[in-house]
């Protein structure tokens, strides 16, 4: 089993920045790919960013150029740097991990961290 613990969410004004962290523990040898998804009230969960073991990244069109995903393999931690935040970025953000590409199948989810962007 793998445990994912997110941190770094909070309340920020539009145009501000936040950095989310996701610490992985447990059977971490079983995961390669990591990512971040978000779910706003009344909406489906959407994948916003993913990173491969080699460091290749993918982003949703809505966040490309504003968000940056990264990982520190030595610390078993993934990050999501969010800049130029907009009210529509308000959501619960979930860390995801898998042996497979995140867009294909997520095997582990974190508990989520709330991000609220005020206008």
Image (cartoon, rainbow, N blue to C red):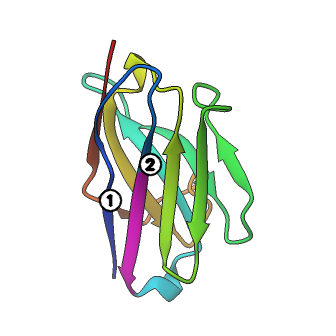
Identify the element where label 2 is drawn: strand
88 or 42: nearer the eye? 88
- Chief secondary structure of the magenta portion: strand
- Whether residue 117 is situated above or below residue 48 in the rendered picture: above
Q: Which residues are magenta?
A: 20-26
Q: Is residue 12 above or below residue 31?
A: above
Q: Residue at x 72, y 64 (%)?
A: 55
- Classify the position of the C terminus by image quarter: top left
Q: Is residue 108 left or right of residue 10?
A: right
Which of the two labelled residues, at mark 1 and mark 2, occupies the earlier sequence position? 1
**In which image quadrant can residue 40 be found?**
top left
Identify the mark at residue 117; answer none if there is no mark. Answer: none
Crowding near the residue tagged with mark 1, few <14, some 14–19, many ≥20 C-alpha atoms within 10 Å: many
Q: Which residue is mark 1?
A: 6
Q: Is residue 119 left or right of residue 85?
A: left
Question: Residue 119, relative to residue 24: is it above or below?
Answer: above
Residue 52 in picture, x, y percent from top left:
67, 64
Crowding around mark 2 (Cα neighbors within 10 Å: few <14, some 14 to 19, many 20+) is some
Say which residue label 2 marks. Answer: 19
In the drawing, does residue 103 fall left or right of residue 40?
Answer: right
On screen, residue 2 above or below 108: below
For label 1, the SS is: strand
Cα separation, mark 1 vs mark 2, equals: 11 Å
Q: Nearer the viewer, residue 36 or 107?
A: 36
Q: Position of residue 13 (x, y in %)?
A: 35, 22
Query: Quadrant location of residue 34?
Result: bottom right
Q: Residue furthest top?
A: 119
- In the rendered image, residue 62, in percent from the top left (x then y), is placed at 58, 25
Query: Is 59 covered by the magenta stretch?
Result: no
């Amino acid at each position: 089993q793998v445990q994912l613990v997110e941190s770094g969410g909070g309340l920020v004004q539009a145009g501000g920045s936040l950095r989310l962290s996701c610490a992985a523990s447990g059977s971490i040898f079983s995961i390669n790919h990591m990512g971040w998804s978000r779910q706003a009230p009344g909406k489906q969960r959407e994948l916003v960013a993913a990173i491969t073991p080699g460091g290749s990244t993918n982003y949703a069109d809505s966040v490309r150029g504003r968000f940056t995903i990264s990982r520190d393999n030595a610390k078993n931690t993934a990050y999501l740097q969010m800049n130029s935040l907009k009210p529509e970025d308000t959501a619960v953000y979930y860390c995801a991990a898998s042996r497979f590409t995140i867009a294909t199948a997520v095997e582990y989810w974190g508990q989520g961290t709330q991000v609220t962007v005020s206008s």
